[in-house]
Amino acid sequence: MDPGSSGYKDYVAGLMAGIAMVITGHPFDTVKVKLQKHNTEARGIKYNNGLHCAARILQTEGVKGLYRGATSSFIGMAFESSLVFGIYSQTKLLLQGGPDGGKPQPRAIVPSAAFGGAIISFILCPSELVKCRMQVQGADSVVPSSSRYSGPLECAVKTVKSEGITGIFRGGFTTLLRESLGNAVFFSTYEYVRYHLHLRLKGASSESSHLVDVGVGIMSGGLGGIACWSAVLPLDVAKTIIQTTPEKNHTRNPFLILKSIYGRSGLRGCYTGLGPTIVRAFPANAAAIVAWELSAKLLGIKRDLN
């Protein structure tokens, strides 16, 4: 198969993966962002843990509160996922010279995933800025009522009015770092886990092959998500702070922010939100991979090991 033969189909399959990821993972993401915003400040609301934070959101706002900011997340994640899966698939095929069905090749996987991550960071940064600002302004937020936004569009317009067009890209460098590194870790873990599981389950009967594929997708996607977020969560903490801090002159250097947090709270502070992030990472990424692989199969895209 030549690299361009699946064409737009890779991007359609990626779009389906993004939709599945948001539906499954957004409530956990809201809890993570709340913890990162309020539990890293010198003063502010302190949540005991992710469960306490989720309970507070449900108590004050109901289920709707857990999906706060989901509109921008759906738009951002749909485009992001479509591009990252599409770019990754096409670039990997190009570097490999086609699907070889053999052992994963890091020289093709790592640059393809990092390149896809770098490209989508430019789309992801504005949508995540809006999402994060919407998420931190819940009913029990320290954000004053006068500074709150009625919806994602108002948030985006007010940000551009007060901070200029560059304001909507606040945290762009940190997003690029997080996405490049995170996607390289995610796809490497996914490919290796998938390869070794398929190797062990080679003798499965054809009747159960669909169940095996779903099971492998769940495990490889879930473990890939956990590995990814374990590697990049400190950068994500820094990004949340950069994007939600009202001061225009606040530093945007993620390493200076992490140094400051480490000085106050140690390594634990740099991994604020780890609980809900890891709890979210497995089901959200498992859902994304299962949706991606199922869509690819329905669209007739031939993949390694298929």
Image (tube, rainbow, N blue to C red):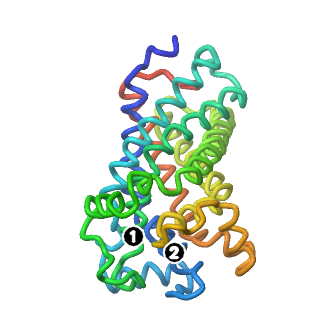
Judge by depth and name the residue closer to the eye, 182 or 240. 240
> Who comes first in sequence, dot 2 or dot 1?
2
Judge by depth and name the residue closer to the eye, 265 or 102. 265
Q: Amino acid at mark 2?
A: Lys
Give percent across and percent down for residue 70: 33, 60
Quarter-of-image position of residue 14? top left
In the image, what residue occupies the spot 65% across and 63% down?
234
Query: Residue 37, which numbered label?
Result: 2
* Residue picked out by circle 1: 135
Give percent across and percent down for residue 209: 50, 34
| In contact (CB < 8 Å): disc 2 and disc 1 | yes
In the image, what residue occupies the spot 51% across and 37% down?
119
In the image, what residue occupies the spot 33% across and 55% down?
72
Give percent across and percent down for residue 205: 54, 31
19 relative to 192, above or below = below
Q: Residues within 10 Å of mark 1 (few under 14, many from 20)?
A: many
Give percent across and percent down for residue 239: 55, 61
In the image, what residue occupies the spot 75% across and 77% down?
263
Callout 1 secondary element: helix
Q: Amino acid at mark 1?
A: Gln
Determine the CA span between mark 2 and mark 1.
10 Å
Callout 2 secondary element: helix
